[in-house]
């Protein structure tokens, strides 16, 4: 009755849960950023910036947990690798959203000297 297969890594499961929380935070942030009152960028979108940085922090935690899980021996690494892939994808998506917010801000507030 002894199961020879290694158990799932608790660290990997935690990494996946944290990465999924980061995904939800990113989805909410992207939704709020695209609301008409924020997309126009008439005032500083503080809520979007705070949510973007919180999401970035949660994603980095998920990334670090995923790396730790992938380095564990004698444990299944599937959840850690999934969390790692999701965290890396979210980092790219958050950078893209941040770039979009910055571009929207520049378009709404052109500089006077043209630079």
Image (spheres, rainbow, N blue to C red):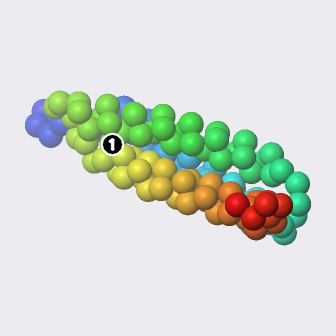
- Residue 28 is left or right of residue 17, and the answer is right
- Figure check: 38 above or below 12: below
The reply to whether residue 80 is visible in this rendering is yes
Rendered position, 67 above or below 108 = above
Asked if 102 appears above or below 51 in the picture, the reply is below
Q: Position of residue 60 (x, y in %)?
A: 48, 38
- When asked about the image quadrant of residue 9, the answer is top left
Q: Which of the pair 27/74 is nearer the observer?
A: 27
State the residue in front, 100 or 91: 100
Where residue 66 sits: x, y (%)? 36, 39
Residue at 36% in and 46% down = 84
Q: Nearer the viewer, residue 100 or 18?
A: 100
Residue at the spot x=75%, y=64% of the render?
114
Q: Position of residue 75 (x, y in %)?
A: 21, 34
Q: Which quadrant would the C terminus be assigned to in this image?
A: bottom right
The extreme front residue here reads 113
* Residue 12 % position (x, y): 35, 38
Judging by the rendered image, the residue that carries numbered circle 1 is 80
Residue displayed at 26% across by 38% down: 70
Q: Is residue 108 above or below residue 8?
A: below
């Amino acid at each position: 009755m002894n199961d020879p297969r290694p158990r799932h890594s608790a660290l990997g499961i935690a990494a996946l849960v944290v990465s999924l929380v980061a995904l939800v935070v990113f989805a909410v942030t992207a939704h709020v950023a695209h609301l008409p009152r924020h997309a126009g960028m008439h005032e500083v979108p503080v809520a979007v910036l705070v949510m973007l940085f919180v999401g970035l922090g949660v994603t980095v935690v998920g990334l670090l947990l995923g790396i730790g899980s992938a380095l564990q021996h004698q444990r299944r690494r599937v959840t850690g690798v999934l969390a790692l892939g999701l965290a890396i994808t979210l980092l790219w998506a958050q950078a893209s959203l941040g770039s979009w917010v910055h571009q929207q801000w520049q378009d709404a507030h052109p500089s006077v000297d043209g630079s």
